[in-house]
Image (spheres, rainbow, N blue to C red):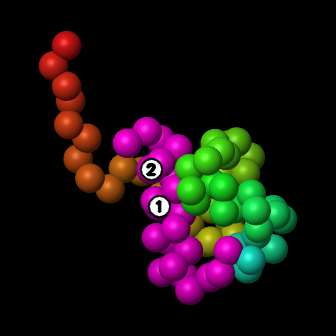
Amino acid sequence: MDLKEVMATNLRRIRHVKKMTQEELADSAGLSVRYVGAIERADVSASVTVLGRIAEALGVEATDLIKRTTPHAHRAR
């Protein structure tokens, strides 16, 4: 899973835990609902600035959005 997908999964999970709709998150972060949806689908990569705005709107650290929740298996080269 690449970092864009990790962020999509974490964003969706955290938003649901906070009981926020995409519309509420978008409004709070100053983003469009379509853009928030695209980030949650991993269709687009969010900039560091947008990552910060989303984290602030959710009341979490930006690192919480990009932290892998499962151990990352290292592949032999």
For residue 62, the mark is none
Q: Position of residue 62 (x, y in %)?
A: 57, 54
SS state under label 2 = helix
* Quarter containing the N terminus: top left
Residue 10 can be seen in this image:
yes
Disc 1: CA contacts within 10 A as few (<14), some (14-19) or many (>=20): some
21 inside magenta stretch: yes
Secondary structure at numbered mark 1: helix
Residue at far left of view: 76
- Count of marks overlaid on the render: 2
Query: Which percent across, then down, holds residue 49?
Result: 74, 46
Q: Please report the residue visible at 25 percent of the width from the left and 41 percent of the height from the top.
A: 72
Residue bearing the label numbered 1: 10
Mark 1–mark 2 distance (CA, rounded to whole Å)? 6 Å
Numbered range of the magenta stretch: 1-22
Q: Name the residue under label 2.
A: 6
Give the crowd class for mark 2: few <14, some 14-19, many >=20 residues within 10 Å: some
